[in-house]
Image (cartoon, helix red, strand yellow):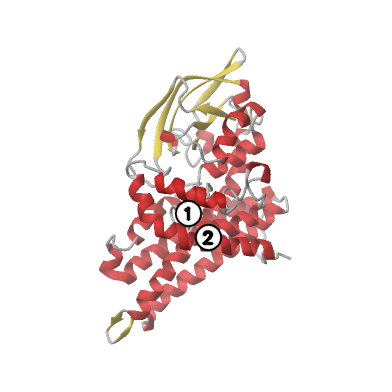
Amino acid sequence: MTDFAFSPELEALRREVRAFVDDVVIPAEAAILSEDEKKDRTTLRALRERARAAGLFVPHLPTELGGRGLGVLGMCALFREMGRSPVGAAVFNCDAPDQGNMDLLLRSASPEIKAKWLGPLTRGEITSGFSMTEPAPGAGADPGNLRTRARKDGSDWVIDGHKWYTTGGGDAAFLIVMARTSDDPKTGASMFVVDRHAPGVVHVRDVPVMCPPILVHREAEFRYEGVRVPESAVLGEIGEGFRLAQKRLVPARLTHCMRWLGLADRAVHMAKAYLLTRQSFGKELARHQLVQHAIFEAVQGIHAGNLMTLHCAWMLERGQDREARPYSSMAKHHVARLLCKTLDDMIQLHGALGFSEDLPFSVWYRFARASRIADGPDEVHEMLVARDFFRGAIETLV
């Protein structure tokens, strides 16, 4: 039987993170985002030091790396609170892609790579990128289209290829690069840790996108032109790239889901005060049935997404990594759509005010729209869940 109760210790920690976000992070949002336009991190660094002093920095990591050693359920509990602010995860050094990259290095990197990159990354001294997506006809939703190649040359590997949508790549200290090392459909890819400033790593541009850039969420395009890396740069073993990507992706989807749920929850609570006081057609907006319907859908959707995500996290904690994959797809698909719909509805319920940037909903929506594409577009998750259902790999009543 699934137990959704947090331990008293985790519940206390969750409340501590919630208070820190509400009392410290949210009041500093405007300053952090304003400074970010000039790539100034003064306020962000100051808040990170406060989070570190409070023992809330990188709580997902083992204690020897400064964390709390939380499992996946613990991560979900805290990330939900961090996600109430678009800059919240960054304050605690739990933002994507760094958080997923930390876990990947921790599990799969050589001692040399850990010594060089993992410590500075966990301390927030550097950032990183995950370089897998390629322009068409290369790898996108179908990783089997991977075209970037790595060939053995003596004791080194030489990487050639073209990537884009490497989040945060322009400012990263290092990149985790997925490259084809054979033509085998299952074992043909490998991951390499590459110094962002190594010879042959060409930062072509940051790709202009629908939303304004926020902190590391700038989408970089790269060319790898004869980039040479040593054998120690391989993550895991040669041929394990697709497997490692799945190991990284399933829990990463859940951490995204929890951050998105936190933002959706904040949005609907922000709307509450307005809807209870704004009068239209003789009564408060909150008393109109169509308004109540929109709030119902948001509240129901947030609750359902929370349960889906916690259930999948519970499976991962039980070691059911493979079994959890379709459930992570369902959670990601649901929460991404929920976030977009909730923000769209909150814009609509506030009318002209919601459409303005006097409220943050329109900016949040432009940022959130990528959620239905990143980590697999909606259509791929629908296909994967249907496939697993037809082959008997999903229990719908758990």
User: Residue at 35% across / 38% down in the picture?
Assistant: 207
**What mark, if any, has residue 81 been given in the picture?**
2
Dividing the picture into quarters, in which one does residue 9 lie?
bottom right
Q: Quadrant of the N terminus?
A: bottom right
Label 2: state its secondary structure: helix
Q: Position of residue 173 (x, y in %)?
A: 48, 32
In front of the other: 81 or 348: 81
Q: Is residue 375 above or below residue 334?
A: above
Q: Position of residue 391 (x, y in %)?
A: 66, 52
Residue at far bottom of view = 282
What is the C-alpha distance between the residues marked 1 and 2?
A: 8 Å
Number of marks in the rendered image: 2
Q: Quadrant of the C terminus?
A: bottom right
**Does residue 192 appear to the left or right of 322 in the view shown?**
left
Q: Residues within 10 Å of mark 1 (few under 14, many from 20)?
A: many
Q: Is residue 180 above or below residue 105?
A: above
Q: Position of residue 120 (x, y in %)?
A: 55, 35
**Does residue 2 appear to the left or right of 140 in the view shown?**
right
Label 1: state its secondary structure: helix
Mark 1: amino acid: Gly
Pointer 1 with pointer 2, Cβ within 8 A: yes
Mark 2: amino acid: Glu
Dividing the picture into quarters, in which one does residue 40 lie?
top left
Visible in this render: residue 334? no
In front of the other: 379 or 365: 365
**What mark, if any, has residue 75 been given in the picture?**
none
Mark found first going from the N terminus, 1 or 2: 2
Visible in this render: residue 259? yes
Q: Residues within 10 Å of mark 2 (few under 14, many from 20)?
A: many
User: Residue at 53% across / 60% down in the picture?
Assistant: 81
Q: Position of residue 156 (x, y in %)?
A: 59, 17
Say which residue label 1 marks.
88
